[in-house]
Image: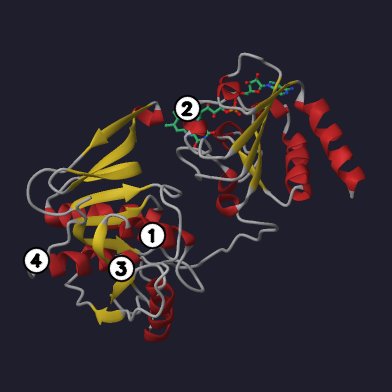
Amino acid sequence: MTLLDRVWVAAESATGGPSSATLELVSGARGLGKVVELFTWGDEATVASSADVLGGYGVTRVYSVGDIGPALPGPRVASGMAGLIWAGDSPDVVLVGATYDGRDVAGRLSAKLDRPTITNVVGLAEAEGPRLVAEHAIFGGAQSATSQFTGPGPGIFVVRDKTFEARPTEVSGVPVSVVPVEVAELGRTSAAQVVSRHVETQEGPKLDEATVVVSGGRGLGSPERYALVEELAALLHGAPGATRAIVDAGWVAYSHQVGQTGKTVRPTVYIACGISGATQHMVGMKGARHVIAINTDRDAPIFGIADLGVVGDCGVVLPRLIESLRARG
Ligand code: FAD
């Protein structure tokens, strides 16, 4: 396989080191290019300690746009990337995560370089050229397409989380160089500032990192029944998830949403309670190793991807399941 020469990755914001989304992207990038370089921000000490971690994931150079204070990272990261490209650098590919910050970087870079972006990417493979072929969702997730860039300039791909698995390299102790990057005049489009941050309190594992996810849908019948989903998730040391239907209905916070416009999960076990199995939901959980579905309608689409299906009422099945798990201690 012909590897690309250079892959650039935009970091995702995280406190206390590189986020899992960043580690996934650089791990994926390592399989695509000979050299993986990351763009990030922060004070010198933070960037240096991130660089140490990133070296273990195959990154050889970290470009830093410096301490950005309360500013959003998008304008500075995109400006830093574009500045290097205008000065003659030529990455084959730029990968950003499908998050608020990632989309901000991609949109700004696209405008600066006059290159399109390919968004909602769920798979990347090498093609002739060497170029990358991207598998990505279209028509609201109802269909998937394969696309590739033509012409000069880097391909800008907005990649959904869990497309790659975060894997450290077997080689240890590779030095990572940290290179400060000039940020050009940003203009008025960088005027937005973060005025406050709210860190959501959470018990148990994070939804997108949990090995067991128990999700509830409209079939629960009432917001109060979501407590059953939370209790089952806690008993299984997992995380509770939800469909957009019940998030939109105000039963649970958006941070619980699984699917195309929510989180992508890849647990060992996914338990879908009162969920029909709409394409937009399944796109976020179809990577689960085992799917268990509880639904009163034996023709519900979710049974099409379930390893174990229970045709039954959540209001009856969930309390019994909880009771028997509690009895086991
Ligand atoms: P329903 O489709 O109403 O299904 C409820 C199910 O519960 C039914 O199958 C029913 O048989 C079953 N049921 C009823 N009573 C019981 C009972 N007592 N016990 C057990 N089962 C019972 N959706 C997402 O989830 N995530 C997304 O990120 C997302 N993004 C979207 C993006 C776009 C652009 C669009 C257009 C839609 C998106 N949606 C998303 C919405 C999606 O299309 C569906 O509307 C949604 O997933 C349906 O949620 P649901 O399964 O809870 O509800």
Q: Answer above or below: position of 18 versus 297.
A: below
Mark 2 touches mark 4? (CB < 8 Å): no
Check disc 3: other Cα within 10 Å, few if <14, some if 14-19, many if 20+: many
Tag 2: amino acid: Thr
Mark 3 and mark 2: Cα distance apart in space: 33 Å
Mark 4 and mark 1: Cα distance apart in space: 27 Å
Of the image marks 3 and 2, the number of the one nearer the N terminus: 3
Q: Can you tell which of label 1 and label 3 is closer to the viewer?
A: 1
Q: Secondary structure at mark 3?
A: strand
Q: Can you tell which of label 4 and label 1 is closer to the viewer?
A: 1
According to the image, label 4 marks what residue?
86
- Image quarter of residue 276: top right
Q: Secondary structure at mark 1?
A: helix
Mark 1 and mark 3: Cα distance apart in space: 12 Å
Q: Which mark is residue 279?
A: 2
- Residue 189 in sight from this viewpoint: no
Instruction: Identify the residue at horizontal 17%, vertical 53% (top origin).
Output: 111
Mark 2 and mark 4: Cα distance apart in space: 41 Å
Q: Closer to the camera, 156 or 41?
A: 156
Q: Secondary structure at mark 4?
A: helix
According to the image, label 3 marks what residue?
38
- Residue 52 in sight from this viewpoint: yes
- Residue 133: x %, y % from top left: 24, 41
User: Which residue extends farthest right?
Assistant: 327
Q: Closer to the camera, 290 or 23?
A: 290
Q: Is residue 239 left or right of residue 156?
A: right
Instruction: Identify the residue at horizontal 32%, vertical 79% (top origin).
Output: 176
Q: Can you tell which of label 3 and label 4 is closer to the viewer?
A: 3
Check disc 1: other Cα within 10 Å, few if <14, some if 14-19, many if 20+: many
Mark 2 near ligand 1 (CB under 8 Å)? yes
Of the image marks 1 and 2, the number of the one nearer the N terminus: 1
